[in-house]
Image (tube, rainbow, N blue to C red):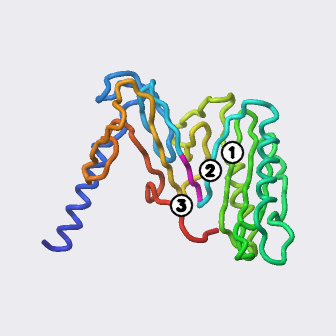
Amino acid sequence: MSRIFCRCFAALATVAIMAGCAPTNRNQPMHRFNEPTRTYGVGRFVVDIPAAMTFSGGYSFQGRKIEEIVWHDKEDPLNTWNHHIEKINRREAPKGVSSALIEEREIAGIGVWCKTVLYFNEPLDPHYGAMDLLLNTGPTGLWIKAWDKKLSAKETTYEISNDIARACRAPEKRFDRVEVIDGRDAFYLRYGAVDLPFEYKESVDIVFRKHPLDKPNTNHQHPGGGQGQPCGHAGGAGSGAGGQHRPRGRGR
């Protein structure tokens, strides 16, 4: 079989699979369950899932780990930050350095408040560090964590994380989700969204739960042979160029 024929066949197969996985109309019954659905943004995708189903996931955006927190008490944001600083202060510092914590900053004009901390994440390599940002939006918090970054380029690390925080669109109330806006280039999280276009290194790992018709520990086969949910069931979603691709190595 010629290489040209193989490439053509692979391209046609990819188109066929994508066509079979096209999202259903919003708020319409899904063909597998025949029940009302809700439309959610998941990374760069919009999916319809049964109204009784919930989901949770992990997110990576521009090489940074993104974590959302729903505050339960007005003291939670500051307590969370102080506890994080305490953990950093207990980390082992590089030889000749008194503390693993390098500096803290507060970024004005973003959310209720926005704090960052720069620290050594590897005691054997004092040239690299980590920068964690916590954005307090009011009802929720957003961690933006950059790991293994060159300390000589720390201002670039700050700039990228700060730009992500500024582009965050948070829900108005706890446990609400932001609206999926047609035509807006956004990366959707569990509750909020980051209104920025795709650049590099994005990923979403999603788990859907609590559907009354699902049987526990039931695996389905994708056409490619891997385990997962069939098209239309919204069993998982990747995001950006590369789907479940995780950033590796040292980036910006």
Q: What residue is at 70 percent from the left and 76 percent from the top?
A: 124
Kind of residue sitting beneath label 2? Ile
Measured as percent of width and height from the top left, residue 155 is found at 77, 67
At label 3, counting other C-alpha atoms closer than 10 Å, the crowd grade (few under 14, some 14-19, many 20 or more) is: many
Q: How many marks?
A: 3
Separation (CA) of disc 3 from disc 2: 12 Å
Q: Is residue 85 above or below residue 141?
A: below
Q: What residue is at 84 percent from the left and 52 percent from the top?
A: 106
Q: Tell me which corner region of the image, top left, top right, bottom left or bottom right, holds residue 243.
A: bottom left
User: Residue farthest to the right?
Assistant: 98
Can you identify the residue that label 2 sits on? 66
Residue 38, which numbered label?
Answer: none
Q: Quadrant of the N terminus?
A: bottom left
Can you identify the residue that label 1 sits on? 142
Between discs 3 and 2, the one toward the N terminus: 2
Task: Give the magenta-colored segment's residue range.
Answer: 58-62
Q: Is 209 left or right of 174, judged from the image as shown?
A: left
Measured as percent of width and height from the top left, residue 176 is found at 62, 29
Kind of residue sitting beneath label 1? Leu
Can you identify the residue that label 3 sits on? 201
